[in-house]
Amino acid sequence: MINHPAFVVEPWSVHETELQLDRLAQTESIFALGNGHIGLRGNLDEGEPAGLPGTYLAGFYEARPLPYAEAGYGFPEAGQVVINVTNGKLIRLLVEDEPLDIRYGELRSHERVLDLRAGVLRRKLEWVSPTGRAIRISSTRLVSLAQRAVAAIRYEVETLDGPTPVVVQSELVANEKPPVAESDPRAAAALASPLHSVYSGDRDSRVLLEHSTHASGLTMAAAMDHIVDGPPHVQASAESFEDIGRLLVSADLVPGKPLGLVKLLAYGWSAERSPPAILDQVAGALAEARHRGWEGLLTEQREYLDDFWERADVEIDGDAELQQAARFSLFHTLQAGARAERRAIAAKGLTGPGYDGHAFWDTETFVLPLLTYTVPPAARDALRWRRSTLELARARAGALGLKGAAFAWRTIRGQECSGYWPAGTGAFHVNADIADAVLRYQAASGDEEFAGAEGVELLVETARLWRSLGHHDDTGSFRIDGVTGPDEYSAIADNNVYTNLMAERNLRAAFDATRRHPQRAAELGVDEEEAASWRDAAQAMLIAFDEQRGVHAQAQSYTEHEVWDFAATSSAQYPLFLHFPYFDLYRKQVVKQADLVLALHLRGDAFSDEQKARDFAYYEQLTVRDSSLSACTQAVIAAEVGQLELAYDYFSEAALIDLDDIQHNARDGLHIASLAGTWIGAVAGFGGMRDHDGILSFNPRLPQALTRLAFRLCVRGRRLLVEVGHEQATYSLLRGSTLQIVHHGEQATVHAKRPVTRPIPAAPAVEKVSQPAGRAPRRRGGPSRSGA
Ligand code: BGC
């Protein structure tokens, strides 16, 4: 694991004090800004050097064929790849006649700060050009959370020694050259020149470029406008061509009189609207941004975030680095989903092209718990995005010979894009994960309108899928054979416990939904017999248990497989999927990511405490965490079974996954599920929060090093503050009149202005657990990342 001394530990920002070119791509992900609609990687203003240039629009992709060496019936034929769209971040600078490029001349200082409260990225640098001219640059960049289509940059250049002629070139550039292709399957299939020009034009300080994709038939427009304030005799002129538009601002600078430029950006796209309509949309957004002005945009951003932090902040006392990491995690999860508004929330958010910009179950299982309890409308919109893919999911189920809907395992628009069916199509659990997110959202928000419309549809169509995918065997048990659970080092197994338990809840909930919304159910063609068949399947669900070992089998016969030879596997051979064939991983006991352990969390109501401890210990020794979607779940269950120090280690890993580049691929984009998992680790781990069947319960307990944990939850219009210490926990209502909760098994009613304080019982005695050789999480409490 790498420890980077580059970020200073501060509670509300990520602060880099020097530029390290070898880590440029990672820091571009970390310093990415987004609002769920627009995503700007933290590329340097002048564009070069760059690790990976990136500007993304949620849902905007190019289609590409998925060629197979040996094709089979039902294999998806086309893939979808996120596109690096027109880059509006670019502000190049010519100092005398030397372009600012930090690889030349002398970089005296370079500092970047991601300010989590202001919602901006600030950069300051001092550079001496090869011809000896010293300048200072300050830039502040924001992607507006309040104005969905708008981003803006304030750029200021100042000469430090004597009169200096400069030219500031503010640009829009389409079809930037893609980086060299990588062999890691988690990286993206970069497309060369994915955009073709539809329109380009300029007027005064404004430029508009519009492009379409070749195959997916989408059209996007990017527009920029500027407000220049600077020394007298500044000259500005704009020009535009097919793939490039620029504003050139020339000035003669003298010390103490900087040249300032505010660049306003607007982005829009559509599959339906005409090119003129999209141009109008961005022109309108620009006019609105101009109307707000730079200060107005900053103020709105701050107000949006003040409100967010009031609803969502997680306070961690006793570990400053984790406090910073937790807020960083919350901020990026917000940026991924805040304004996605019925577009997919990708595994990398809009921070990089990894996984081709696809959304997975990551959204429903990891991101939506956080959004549900902190920004409920964003959770609703994400579920509405899934709902918008229902027709495609029905068609997919039909093609697979199944009923109901089979939602895509990985996609941007909704079509299945996984070319590897054992871990794509086979991973049917995504359907139950969607149902689970629906139930959580409905219970936490009380949104009856959603429940009666999209909610019923999603529950009914996924229940239909389960009913047709499984069958009652001779003994009457309901089996779901030949599917892949969360652990991608197993595939096409019978009765994966996680899948069966999640499907059981799905079937039961669909049955209940038809009782609560009989009319909508009838419109969907559900009759008594069908609903009863779901209830019966749920009641008869087979849960694989190994009597001999006294543990649940991840899937039937799993515990009889040979155990992976961990002793003979070197640390350089992880992640295993890059060094061993899947056929071998599949036939042995080795767990890529929490699977049965995730069932212990999400279906904790189906296990006894003793069983959880036994199952956790068993799967700990097999779990290698080759996926970032594991540590947070291990933290949650470790905390539940009383392994608090281990939970702390896992929690730290989830939280620091990108700041410390633990998986060595933060360059391709951040691991949004793991970042959201930081919230899960705090709230469900140390807070012990569960919401089975809509009942909110807490079993809080802290590891030694933490002195206090506080978090907030939005529940049915109320706001609950939970504060946890070592001895006791306090529940206060910040908004709303009363709320029923359960604390360590005891009911309590929290009233407004009457906080409830309860003692925390001692943790249960624990048995020692171990991990595969070399795969234990790094111990927390070692040297910190920064000297600050
Ligand atoms: C994990 C999947 C996950 C995907 C995207 C894979 O490595 O195994 O569970 O959905 O990454 O994050």
Image: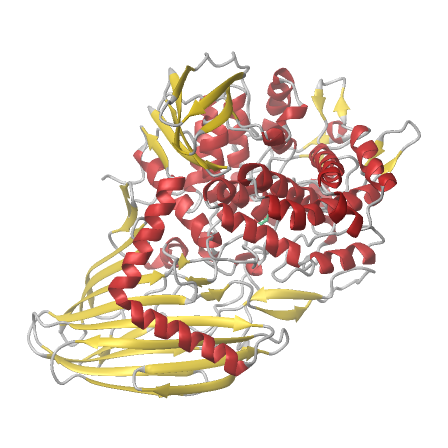
Q: Is residue 124 above or below residue 451?
A: below
Residue 327 placed where, x, y %?
37, 42
Please indicate whether residue 580 sits to the left or right of residue 205 in the image. right
Quarter of the figure that contains the N terminus? top left
Q: Is residue 96 above or below residue 379?
A: below
Please indicate whether residue 474 sits to the left or right of residue 154 in the image. right
Residue 579 visible from this viewpoint: no
Residue 498 placed where, x, y %?
69, 34
Q: Nearer the viewer, residue 198 or 91?
A: 198
Q: Quadrant of residue 501?
A: top right
Please indicate whether residue 374 sits to the left or right of residue 250 in the image. right
Quarter of the figure that contains the C terminus? top left
Please indicate whether residue 709 sits to the left or right of residue 492 in the image. left
What residue lies at 60% left-to-right and 43% top-to-bottom?
448
What residue lies at 68% left-to-right and 24% top-to-bottom?
606
Residue 608 placed where, x, y %?
65, 18
